[in-house]
Each structure stands twice: as C-alpha cells, then as structure tokens.
Image (tube, rainbow, N blue to C red):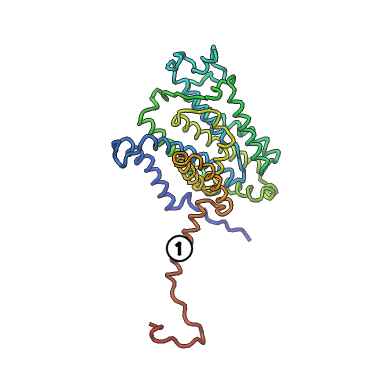
Amino acid sequence: MSAVLAPRTGLLSPKAWLAVVVATLVMVVLVPVLHLVVPEGHALHLGAHYVGLLGKILCYAICALAMDLIWGYAGILSLGHGLFFALGGYAMGMYLMREIGSEGQYRMPMPDFMVFLNWKEFPWHWALSDSFAFQMLMVVAVPGLLAFVFGFFAFRSRIKGVYFSIITQALTFAAMLLFFRNETGFGGNNGFTDFKRILGVPLNTPQMRVFLCVLSGVVLIGFFLLGRMLVQSRFGRVLQAVRDAETRVMFSGYDPVAFKLAIWTFSAVMCGVAGALYVPQVGIINPSEMSPAASIEIAIWAAVGGRGTLVGPIVGAFFVNGAKSWFTAAAPEVWLFFLGALFIAVTLFLPRGLVGLWEMVMQRLRSGKAGEGAAPAAPAAGAPNATKEQAA
C-alpha cells in the first residue's frame, strides 16, 4: 500500500505571522519614533543607552538563533561560536579603523597601534580593508571558511558529543591567544576602538545609532524566517533525524556529514554577521570576545530560552542579557551566581526552557477552561433518581 504524505503546513501560523509583523513595526517605527521624535525628558523617550543596549541584545539574539540551528535541530553543541562572532567583528573593525584616516592620536594614515609599534606599512591582510564591499565579504567568508574547514575534518572523523564541544572550545581559546599578540596586526590586547564613521557617516549621531539598531532587528527577523524555512524543509527534517538517530539516517542512504557541515557553516556565518553589526554599536572589538566564557554564554541563552524552537533562544538572549544589565548595575557580585543558578534550574526543571514553560502554562489554562465549560455527566444507570432541585 502506498504511503500517504502528511500535508505541508505553512511557514508560520497566523498568530506567529502577526507577532512577526508586530515585532517588525516595533523595530522599524516605534524605536525610531521614541528615540528621535519624542523629546528628551519625556516619559516615553527612549534614551541612547537603551537604544545601544537593544542593539547589542539583538546581535546576541542572532548568535543564540545560530546556536539553536546546530544544537536544537542537529544535536551539535558548540562551545566556540564566540570565535565566529569575533571574526565578523574584526572584519568590520578593520574597515572602521581605516575610516578613521589621519584623525587618530598620532595624525597618521595608519591606525594608532601600528604607529606605536613602528610599523611602516599595512600587513598583507589589510590590503583591501579600506573597501566596505570587500570587508563585508570577509564578514561572511572568513567565519564561513574557517567553520567549513574545521567542520569538514571534525565531522568526517565522526567527532561528536562532548569531544566536539571541547575541541571547539580549544579552537576559540587558541584563536584568542593568537589575537592577543601584537605582531598579528589586530591591535593586541586593546583590539580596535575609537571608530569615527562608516561609509563617511559619523557613528555618534542619534540617526546612525537608531539605524544600526533597526538594521540589527531586521536582520534577526530575516534570519528567523530563513531558519524557519530551513527546519520545515526536507533539509531540516533530515537534520532532526541526524540529531535523533544518525546511524539510521546513514543506513537510509543520506550522508550526515554533508547536512551537519552545511548547517554548521551557515550558523557560523550568522554569528559573523552578528559580530559585524555589534562592533559599530559598541565601539570596540578585542580578543575577549573570543574567550570560552563568551561562547558558553551563547549556549546558555539557547538553553534558557528553549532549544529546538527558534523563538526560544531569542527570548533567552533577551532575558539573560536584560538580567545581566540590571544585575551588573544593581549587584554586580551576584550576577555570576544568578547565572549559574538559572542554568542549573533550567537544566533540572525546565528542559524546554522558558518557551516550554509558557506552553505548559497555556496548556493548563486551556484544559482548565475546557473543564469548566464541559456539560455535567448524566447519572449512571441504576443510580437513585435525582431530586427536582438537582434536576433543575
């Protein structure tokens, strides 16, 4: 008998599409109006600090979404995604450093750290760094190429589980040590900072600040829709099968290496784009962004929000970083304890994260309403006759 295929569902439900439209309008309309139109001192004015904080968290949310694609849907836990984020940031930072021109402290056409180290010319990897188009290509190409080469050898060697996680952490730690060295031409311990403009437009204006924040939000929404399209496609279904039973997928005629390598590389590119959006908003990029702790935080955002949901890691990034912003101002010594307790609580009691908790609460509310609206059961056969009052 021939198999009957289940009908394909739409990309999003009507309620989900409404949420996407609302989120887009908030980013494209509400945020600019509250920051640029509403005057300072007004209760509804969105200050520069909060615009910058929102832009940062949106970039972090892109990284969390990238983590969910490989961890939640392919079962690949990376503890080195901070490396790809930093590489995208450095590619953008190189262009921003060239945009400073002769306005640095030494009034030289080279970056201040190169003048301080008595460099006479740019190193080879800075050759086309004054080209915005080329550096935007590097934002995608460098993290993508590194991820492809690393993933090719790792996946073909069938390295998986905790061993893969440890190797990715070792990779980002080695890169951090490399970028700390002055002779690499990346600013050493201080990295890149003191940016002036992008494409000739000053960075410290309210208009540019809002533009970068809105652009980060639009890119996040675009990646979310693209990720949704991927996981609902045949490619996504095979990925989830690889996550659950890789050996069976291989015996079915599919090559798990190709599927894992594709989503791994795409996830790295997403982090590179997030890093490129992050740097002009924060104003600095240094090797600390490659630290193993930064990569572990990305995994925490995905776990807290809810793996395998796409929207969960975005929620987790906002929740954790919002809490971090509050704790570091109110009680900085408590923050790490709170983060550790939160991760333990989610691991033990909320395996599906905040999104799973929300779904559980809503399901109980719906079942409670259904129970209240149910008709009373008829008396069983042989039961004594009900009184008139009971019948009424």
Say which amino acid is labelled 1. Arg
Q: Residue at x 57, y 29 (%)?
A: 142
**x, y percent for residue 145:** 59, 31
Q: Residue at x 54, y 35 (%)?
A: 269
Q: Quadrant of the C terminus?
A: bottom left
- Foreground of the two, 14 or 233: 14
Q: Quadrant of the N terminus?
A: bottom right
Number of disc labels: 1
Residue 299, compared with residue 175, is above or below; it is below
**x, y percent for residue 212:** 41, 33
Apparent side of residue 167 relative to residue 329 in the rendered image (left or right)? right
- Foreground of the two, 379 or 173: 173
**Toward which corner of the image does residue 349 lie, by quadrant?**
bottom right
**x, y percent for residue 74:** 60, 45
Residue for badge 1: 366
Residue 37, compared with residue 346, is above or below; it is above
Evaluate whether residue 159 shows in this view.
yes
Apparent side of residue 123 relative to residue 366 in the rendered image (left or right)? right
Q: Secondary structure at mark 1?
A: helix
- Foreground of the two, 25 or 283: 283
Q: Residue at x 67, y 48 (%)?
A: 246
**Toward which corner of the image does residue 144 lie, by quadrant?**
top right
Classify mark 1: residues with Cα within 10 Å, few (<14), some (14-19) or many (20+).
Answer: few
**x, y percent for residue 263:** 58, 40
- Foreground of the two, 191 or 98: 191
Evaluate whether residue 255 shows in this view.
no
